Image (cartoon, helix red, strand yellow):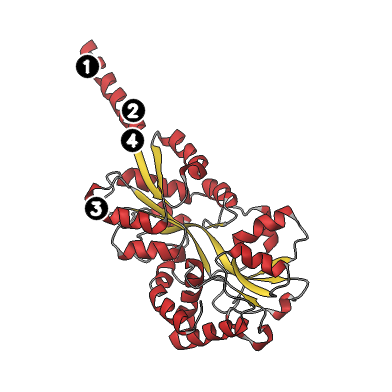
Amino acid sequence: MNFSLKVLLLSCTLLTSLSAAEKTLTIYSVYPGDKLEAVFKPFTKRTGIAVNVVSAKSKFLIDRIKREGENTIADLHLDKDLVYHTTATQKGIYQPFKSKVVEENVPANFIETNKNWFTIFYRSRVIMYNRDLVSPRELSTYSDLGNKKWKGKLCVRTSNSTYSQALSASIVAHLGSNKALNVFKSWVANFAMDPTSSDRDVIRALAAGKCHVGLVNSYYLAPFIEADSEYPVRPFFANQGFSNAHVNGVGIGITKYSKNVKEATMLLEYLSSKEVQAPVAKAFDQYPVNPKAPLSPTLVDFGSFEVDKINVGTVGNLVETTKELMLKAEYK
């Protein structure tokens, strides 16, 4: 090989390396960049692909991606739950991902039906109770919270919370609109106080004895327990043996007009791997979707449970119908 050819090959190698190092993925995220830096830093170190995070509120980001169209710089959209991802899907801002690795790592119920997005890690919408006032033997299903024995004892979050909407949509999916409406009405009849705008407020009300049972995302309880092992509020995973516990979680999808689909797919595969799933889920006090990833000690202490196997996309598509039913039930 002559000297000129060696120089040419070396130049091509350096240019290829430089190109890889200069690749940047942009994620529009509901979570700020500083909270995600530790998640993406190993990916950049491993691949040479930088990750730029643009953060804002869910609705703003979805509308921005839609408005920007082909000119968007967003390669991926990361959001906090299935309600917002369904809105994004309906606005046509995603393209289906193509990755056998993701499909092997993530159970099918956590992958939206058309592969527009998938859940990275999840929480359960659990029945929480004051263990000084309630025995877990008294608890069973979400619907049973409408039983007259809980009159004046139930605390919930407002109906405009996407967490409330997602749980309620899952009830519509399993029971149908008419039965679900009756469930919502029975809950309203049992409210101990007006619905709150915060899951933490429900936990505090439970601890204070203002209500005996409530509906809360599992991860909100973890810091209370970690700060005080004798904290009186405990989780109960509902509907076991029936539809099983409702779950919802943080998801991600590739945008329709991403210019870096190959690199975006690499990031999806990275996020679904058990090595990444465990520490990331632990940092958010949530459950990894990859069944091979271990749970944090606090979540292990919460106990094992079966999750609802209905597809996250199916639940999301019922949200608008569900909101109308909640309004009919006078669920504030």
Q: Amino acid at mark 4?
A: Lys
Q: Real-space Cα distance between discs 3 and 4?
A: 21 Å
Q: Amino acid at mark 3?
A: Gly
Q: Residue 249's spot in the image, x, y percent? A: 50, 60
Query: Which residue is the site of mark 3?
Result: 69
Q: Amino acid at mark 2?
A: Ser
Q: Is residue 268 left or right of residue 257?
A: right
Asked whether the beta carbons under mark 3 and mark 4 sit within 8 Å of each other, the answer is: no
Q: Residue 44's spot in the image, x, y percent? A: 43, 36
Query: Which residue is the site of mark 4?
Result: 23
Q: Amino acid at mark 1?
A: Leu
Mark 3 or mark 1: whose residue is earlier in sequence = 1
Q: Identify which residue is drawn at 49% across, 76% down.
A: 168
Answer yes or no: is residue 304 visible: no
> Is 266 in front, or is 239?
239
Neighbor class of circle 4 (other Cα within 10 Å; few <14, some 14-19, many 20+) is: some
Mark 3 or mark 4: whose residue is earlier in sequence = 4
Image: 133 above or below 87: below
Query: Which residue is the site of mark 1?
Result: 5
> Is 143 in front, or is 165?
165
Q: Is residue 88 left or right of residue 147?
A: left
Mark 4 or mark 2: whose residue is earlier in sequence = 2
Say which of marks 4 and 2 sits in front: 4
Query: Which residue is the site of mark 2?
Result: 17
Q: Is residue 42 left or right of residue 237?
A: left
Q: Real-space Cα distance between discs 3 and 2?
A: 30 Å
Give the quarter of the image for residue 194: bottom right
Mark 3 or mark 2: whose residue is earlier in sequence = 2
Mark 2 or mark 1: whose residue is earlier in sequence = 1
Q: Secondary structure at mark 2?
A: helix
Q: Residue furthest top?
A: 3
Q: Real-space Cα distance between discs 1 and 4?
A: 27 Å
